[in-house]
Amino acid sequence: MQKVTIELLQAIRRKPISKAELVRLTKYSLAIVTEHTEILLEKNFVREIDRGPSTGGRKPLLLSFNAEAGYIVAIDLESTNVRVGITDLNCNILVSESLDDIDVLAGPTTVLEQVKELVFALLHRVGIESPQIKGIGMGVPGPVEYSVGLPASLSIMRGWDRYPIRQFWSQYFQCPCYVDNNVHTMAIGEQMLDLESKIENLLFLKIGNGIGAGIICKGQIYRGSTDCAGDVGHINMGHDILCYCGNRGCLEAFAGGRAIAARAEEMARNGQSEVLGEIYSKKKKLTLVDVRQAVEVADPVAVELMRECGVAIGNVLAGLVNFFNPSLILIGGGVSQVGDVLLASIRQAVYQRALPLSVRNLVIQYSSLGENAGIVGAAALTVDEIIDNNAFVYTDAH
């Protein structure tokens, strides 16, 4: 019987809907729909709102998901920064803030303590108490054994292997916690923009220090048999640069954020770019922000650097397009903020190298949510899980 209630709640969550529409959508009888929606109304997870359009008789009352029945803590952890948001149950961001002095190599205890302080500061800012939090969603910049919520071994997150993130948060909140690779949460966040979207097959490509893809297949996130699907940054593209994974030739070692900064720094030292050289002489190092600054003033060396990276990424994407045949590719992550030259180069490479049939209806564009994709996705993942796992339907909404 609980399965019916959950199925109805998921349907109501997607849009305001009448009982008659629920009957048509779910194939349950009107008596069963009425019985279970009464449970949801009593628990305050559903509200009755204005009447919908008439289909010939009396205008029906619409049932709407109550987004204010609780709140979600959403966390998007990157290797050098973190963004935290507090959302309602419709994943609308109530408040959010970033910390740019995070270093995941400092280890999970240090980093999570920093994140915890930010979480409680945001809760205090909007006047929300811990018991009102119905779930915590957290994206991390590396593989995760999703079923158990444990980060897997990866050089970018040394010291985090199988660290019990869920148990850390259970010290402060009495609610479920879900941990995933943040490129997966970003993909889910973009899909959350329109729950009725007809786009069921899409790739979200995050280009940061690492490069990874979130795969939405037939409307569902695809994680693979060991939860590590989408690690496209380690596809070999034929160069001889040593990657931190121990192999040579990885896309990430050529076009990831750290790789771009390192190549720009070498160009500055060699006198290839006056703009980059001036920045380097003052700072004695270059970052992705400096490269973006050089691109913004149309420095030809920086522009060509980003064009080369876009072509390399596009060449890899072309193979993925031939294999997976998505209808939408979204580009996000820190490197995507460098400028339009990157997106133009990616598009050109994909459209040139992928098969004509594969790209006939393909759209390639920047992420609509930008820096908020990770926290919206972490919240959406969490709401889906707590509904599907019956984590609050049969508990007091207050």
Image: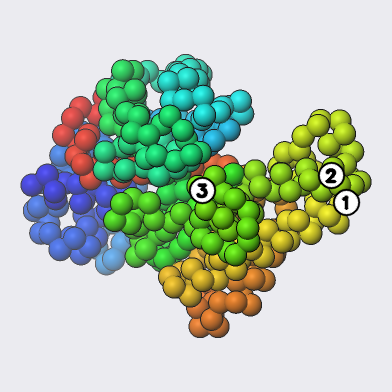
Looking at the picture, tell me which residue is in the foreground, 262 or 221: 262
Q: Are marks 3 and 1 in contact (CB under 8 Å)?
A: no
Q: Residue 398: x and y, percent?
A: 26, 24
Q: Amino acid at mark 1?
A: Gln
Q: Are marks 1 and 2 in contact (CB under 8 Å)?
A: yes
- Mark closer to the chain start, 3 or 1: 3
Q: Which element is circle 2 on?
A: helix
Q: Is residue 174 above or below residue 239?
A: above
Q: Residue 268: which numbered mark, if any?
A: 2
Q: Residue 142: x and y, percent?
A: 45, 42
Q: Amino acid at mark 3?
A: Gly
Q: Quadrant of residue 167?
A: top left
- Mark closer to the chain start, 3 or 2: 3
Q: Residue 246: which numbered mark, if any?
A: 3
Q: Distance from label 3 to label 1 (Cα)? A: 30 Å
Q: Distance from label 3 to label 2 (Cα)? A: 27 Å
Q: Is residue 30 above or below residue 128?
A: below
Dot in front, 3 or 1: 3
Q: Residue at x 61, y 25 (%)?
A: 101
